[in-house]
Amino acid sequence: MGGSIKTIQVALGRATLFMCPPENKMSLWDACAPQAILEEAGGVLTGVRGERIDYSAEDTLLPGGILACW
């Protein structure tokens, strides 16, 4: 199951946490729609250090992984 689907599982309340570690590269486009859905459901999606994801970055890969939680 990909990271975007795992993030949706958190939004649905089927999981409380999903972490994509920095060594597992995730694309920006794999995070943007699930982030919108998760945040509308009351959750939070950030980088693993709590930083906001910069969708205007030139690189299309997230540099440090993500953390999705309630």
Image (spheres, rainbow, N blue to C red):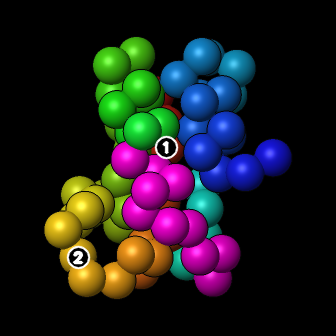
41 to 38, vertically: above or below: above
Q: What is the residue that sits farthest to the right in this orientation?
A: 1
Is residue 62 shown left or right of residue 5?
A: left
Residue 24 lies in the magenta stretch = yes
Displayed quadrant of residue 63: bottom left
Image mark count: 2
Q: Residue at x 50, y 67 (%)?
A: 27
Instruction: Answer whether labels 2 and 1 touch (C-beta < 8 Å).
Output: no
18 to 14, vertically: above or below: below
* Residue 67 rendering spot, x and y as whole percentages: 48, 53
| Kind of residue indicated by mark 2 | Ala
Residue 39 lies in the magenta stretch = no
Query: Foreground residue, 35 or 43?
Result: 35
Is residue 69 shown left or right of residue 51?
A: right
The secondary element bearing badge 2 is classed as loop
- Residue matched to label 1: 68
- Residue matched to label 2: 57
Q: What is the residue that sits farthest to the left in this orientation?
A: 56
User: The magenta stretch spans which residues?
Assistant: 23-32
> Which comes before the other along the chain, label 2 or label 1?
2
User: For the residues marked 2 and 1, what is the alpha-carbon distance in whole angstroms?
Assistant: 20 Å
The secondary element bearing badge 1 is classed as strand
* Residue 57 rendering spot, x and y as whole percentages: 23, 76
Q: Residue at x 60, y 62 (%)?
A: 20
Q: Residue at x 63, y 82 (%)?
A: 23
* Residue 30 rendering spot, x and y as whole percentages: 52, 54
| Kind of residue indicated by mark 1 | Ala
